[in-house]
Image (spheres, helix red, strand yellow):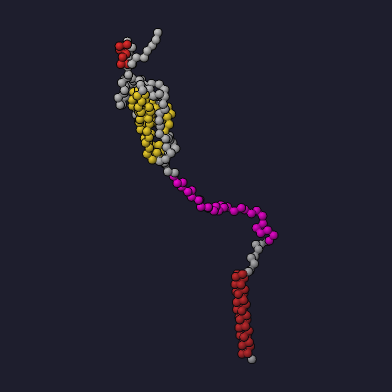
Amino acid sequence: MSLALVPAAQAHTAGVPAAVTAPHRAPGDVTLTGGDFGTVEVGETGTVTLTLTNNGTGAVGFDGLPLNLPDGVTRTGGTCDLDTALLAGESCTFELTWTPTAEGPYTGSVSLTADDDGSVYVVTAQVTGNATVTPTPTPTPTPTPTPTHTWPTSHPSHTGPAWPGHSEPPHLAETGTDATGRGVLLGLAAVTLGAGGFALTRRGRGRAGSHQ
């Protein structure tokens, strides 16, 4: 038995069924929804889930091609398997994380390649977010406590002699200004006494002369 290749235009006359080509999908048959990571601190991680949906009437494959992601975005989960076809009317998900490295708003594009019976097209979606930086609070200086002096509430009692080795309290030495002041007072007292004695002597002599 021999086989011969027959052009599709002559297939009906040769009894060979012609190949049926599936119609190309209309725009929007396969959709990928975008998402927002929200407000994320720089160095922290935000998460978003994208949904891939086949709205057409036939299965669509992705030839195992990876999901194209922008810088800073990583796929960490989801139900989509790009090695298998997505049947008509079905959906799957991509779970993505974003770790910002700088402050400010963010917009990125996510895409994947779909193969509709040899007709290749790209499905895209946008992801957004906002990166913030929390300022470090200035530490409040701790005030230095003011030292306080604690006076003793009582004095220790002395059980021995009031003045060890002495029968009476010792006398302070007369030195300095106190000694000089006392010397002056003693000198004035001596002068006063001397003047009084001199006056008495003269008075006595005067009386003696009046009796002669």
Residue 186 horizontal side relative to residue 85, left or right: right
Quarter of the image holding residue 188?
Answer: bottom right
Q: Residue at x 50, y 51 (%)?
A: 144
As rendered, which of 165 and 73 lies closer to the eye? 73
Work out which quarter of the rendered image holds the N terminus and state it.
top left
Q: Where is residue 140 in the image (x, y as percent from the top left)?
A: 46, 47
Q: Which residue is drawn at 48% across and 50% down?
A: 143
Q: Residue at x 43, y 31 (%)?
A: 74
Residue 32 horizontal side relative to residue 154, left or right: left
- For the magenta stretch, what is the residue range? 137-166
Q: Position of residue 207 (x, y in %)?
A: 61, 87
Is 14 placed above or below 98 here? above
Residue 152 is covered by the magenta coloring: yes
**Magenta highlight: main SS:** loop
As rendered, which of 61 and 45 lies closer to the eye? 61
Q: In this rendering, does residue 158 appear at all?
A: yes
As rendered, which of 149 and 90 lies closer to the eye? 90
